Every structure is written in structure tokens, then in C-alpha cells.
Amino acid sequence: MRKLPLVLLAVTAMSGCTYLPAAGPTASAIQAGAEVATADGGLLARYEIIDVTPSVVEALRGRPLDSLLASFGDHRPSSEPVIGIGDMVSVSVWEAGSGGLFSGPLVADRFSAGSKSALIPEQPVGRDGAISVPYAGRIKVAGRRTQDVQALIENELAGKAIQPQVLVSVTRPISQAVTVTGEGAAGALAGDGDGLGDR
């Protein structure tokens, strides 16, 4: 009775041998598919069949490995997001009181004291990697983090605005987008992502 499960297991394992070799191409299928006939009656080699000999192995051992990194370079994104060329950026500036560059005129009303803000409209980062900020000029932002750009603009406005505080926002990170082209059944993705009704 104990031998019956072992016999059944052995029979099952051996029957699997009839199916497994058929999962890959056979030698005759590889040789037959190496060349295809062209329209003008010639033969086109789709791939070459090379005998793997010790000399072939030795030649391949000395060859450097192919690498996408070597072909395209190391262009991984930084660990912290940085602003790139083409990104849409908006800048908000706050001043400590009225009468500054970005706030309304000083009013005699005692309730008008306090910080005043101005929003500089959204603008794309130019090919030179810079944006325009009134009274600060062209500010190079490409390759920098938003907090670094904020400090840079605050330094440029110091002495011109009343204790300026700056907030920089990347509203559309276009430089981080990737376009994949080719034949496909689905359409392009919308800039704001897909919704449930888009498919």
C-alpha cells in the first residue's frame, strides 16, 4: 500500500517529460527559421547559428558587457525633485507690510497693516534654464530644488522689497514626462491623468 503513492508519483513525473521539451523550439525549427525568402527570390538571414566552441567562449569572455547605461548615460532623476527646462513654475512673494514692491500703497488705515502678497503668473522655464521675476531679473532655476530657488529669489529681492518671503511651485513638471511612441491601440494619456470615463 505504501508503494502505490511512490509509483503514481514516478509515473506522473515521467509523463511530464513528454510535454516539457515541446515548450521550447526544436533544433530543426531553429535551423529552418534562420533564413527567410525575400520578394526578389533571395534569402535573408534573420540570425546566425554559431557553434559554441571553447574559442568562442574565450572570445566572448573578454568582450565588455552591453549596457543601456553605457549607451544612454546615467540620467536617473535626482533623489529630490528638481526644476527642469519646460516645467511650468509659479512664484508667490509676500512682504512684511504695505508700501513695498509687491503690495499696495501705504494706507493711513491702521487695519491695513500686515503681510501683503503677490502671485507672479505661471511661466515656463526657458531654454536658458531661467524664469523672470520682477525686480530680481532672470533667475536660473533649472537643476535646482524649489527651496533653493526660493532662497535665491529672496536674496535678489532683499533691500528692494520689505522682508520678502517667496514660495516657488512647479505647477506642471513637463521635464519629468516621458513620451513613448509606436503602434498602440490606446490613445495618449491626458496631462492630468486618466479618469474612470476615459477608457
Image (cartoon, rainbow, N blue to C red):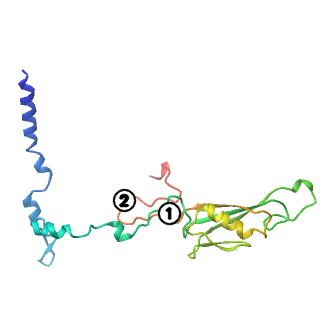
Residue at image point 35% right, 64% down: 183
Considering the numbered disc 1 on the image, is that residue within a helix, a strand or a loop?
helix
Q: Please, what is the three-letter code of the amino acid marked with disc 1? A: Gln
Q: In this view, does 93 lie above or below 11?
A: below
Q: In this view, does 190 lie above or below 22?
A: below
Front residue of 146/27: it is 146
Q: In which quarter of the image is residue 155?
A: bottom right
For marks 1 and 2, the one nearer the N-term is 1
Residue under numbered circle 2: 185
Q: Which mark is residue 59?
A: none
Q: Please, what is the three-letter code of the amino acid marked with disc 2? A: Ala
Count the labels in the image: 2
Residue 54 location in percent, x, y? 10, 66
Residue 175 location in percent, x, y? 51, 66
Residue 99 location in percent, x, y? 85, 65
In the rendered image, is residue 4 in sight? yes
Front residue of 185/24: it is 24
Q: In this view, does 86 lie above or below 1?
A: below
In the rendered image, is residue 46 in sight? no
Q: In which quarter of the image is residue 37?
A: bottom left
User: Which mark's residue is nearer the viewer, 1 or 2?
Assistant: 1
Residue at image point 10% right, 38% down: 13
Whole-angstrom CA distance, mark 1 to mark 2, is 24 Å
Which residue is farthest right?
108
Say few, some or many: other residues with alpha carbon within 10 Å of mark 1 (under 14 / 14 to 19 / 20 or more): some
| Circle 1/circle 2 CB separation < 8 Å | no
Residue at image point 10% right, 41% down: 16
Residue 120 location in percent, x, y? 70, 66
Residue under numbered circle 1: 176
Considering the numbered disc 2 on the image, is that residue within a helix, a strand or a loop?
loop
